[in-house]
Amino acid sequence: MSGLGIALATILAVANRRLHVEEDPRIDEVEEMLPKANCGACGIAGCRPFAEAVVAGKTSPGKCTVNSPEMIEAIANYLGVEAGRVEKQVARLACAGGSHVAYTRARYQGLQTCRAASLVSGGGKGCAWGCIGLGDCASVCDFNALHMNKYGLPVVDEDRCTACGDCVEVCPKDLFSLQPVSHQLWVACKNQDLADEGEAHCELVCTACGRCSADAPEGLIQIRNNLAVIDYSKNALASRVAIERCPTGAIVWFDREKGAVKGVDARRVTRKEPLQRIEPLPRV
């Protein structure tokens, strides 16, 4: 047995020496210049594998949309390659129905997660399409890019968002999607009910009135299943003109500094307290 052990150890030592592959030392240097977020926004699982791919010439430094422009340029100069540019993506929420504008029809009691609540009569919110508001998305965000506002609605910090997609996966209502920051025209609603039924549950619902479609360049916005839908292949034509006559403010324009901006004809919401509920609330 001792002889067999010595023989196997010798074979392993020889194999290790002959099969050993020297790692390019530039990988360590590039990894040090990355943000170490390991978010996967570049399409590669982790900063170390991304560094390996950049050094191997399989991707460009600019594919890391989380890194600063200065560090992307530093990596490119270090490797002697083109930096490349990829437009930053952020998470966007297709709902504006916070507690001050959307009715709650039942009081949910149970595990305080959106996924659990969605399994019990949809969580009690009147709008079956809307955000439940228990914050699963904020809980899974490792980059502090999501917080719940006082109306129980998620708010995305675009500067911190890495487009990792965790909020997209965890939301049981499929309300989040990853969008290039150039997609400034946005429908903050996913309701597909008829106008009267939708407005009975939320004041900021898209009523499919068609004003945005009529005001926008041809083909940019269409009404499908009682909901305004933006064709982002025509995004170069988009402007704030399309939002100005929206009566509820369901369609917005994401301003670089001000965030989501509503049109001039949008209903003004001054209410600070939760929308009056129907009492007594049934339990679900």
Image (cartoon, helix red, strand yellow):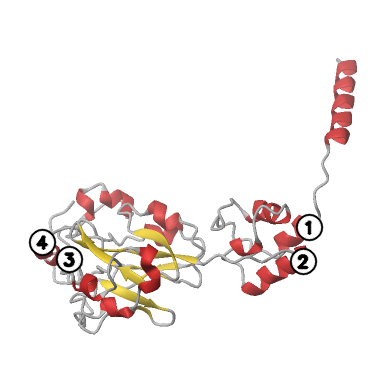
Upstream in the sequence, badge 4 or badge 3? 4
- Which residue is disc 1 drawn over? 26
Structural distance between the alpha carbons of marks 4 and 3: 12 Å
Amino acid type of the residue that numbered disc 3 sits on in the rendered structure: Ala
In the drawing, does residue 84 fall left or right of residue 94? right
Earlier along the polypeptide chain: callout 2 or callout 1? 1
Name the residue carrying label 3: 208
Residue on which disc 2 sits: 78
Look at the picture and state if 58 lies above or below 198.
Answer: above
Query: Circles 3 and 1: CB distance less than 8 Å?
Result: no
Residue at the spot 46% in from the left edge and 71% down from the top edge: 158
Looking at the picture, tell me which residue is in the foreground, 135 or 207: 207
| Residue 241, image quadrant | bottom left
Q: Identify the residue at image location x=70%, y=65%.
A: 33
Q: Amino acid at mark 4?
A: Glu
Secondary element at tag 4: helix
Q: Amino acid at mark 1?
A: Arg
Residue 149 drawn at (x, y percent): 34, 72
What amino acid does circle 2 point to? Tyr
Residue 155: x, y in percent? 38, 70
Left/right placement of residue 215 relative to residue 253 reads left
Mark 4 sits on what residue? Answer: 197
Look at discs 2 and 1 and give the one toward the viewer.
2
User: What residue is shown at x 45% (from left), y 70% (from top)?
Assistant: 181
State the CA–CA distance, disc 2 to disc 3.
53 Å
Going from N to C along the chain, the mark reached first, 2 or 3, is 2
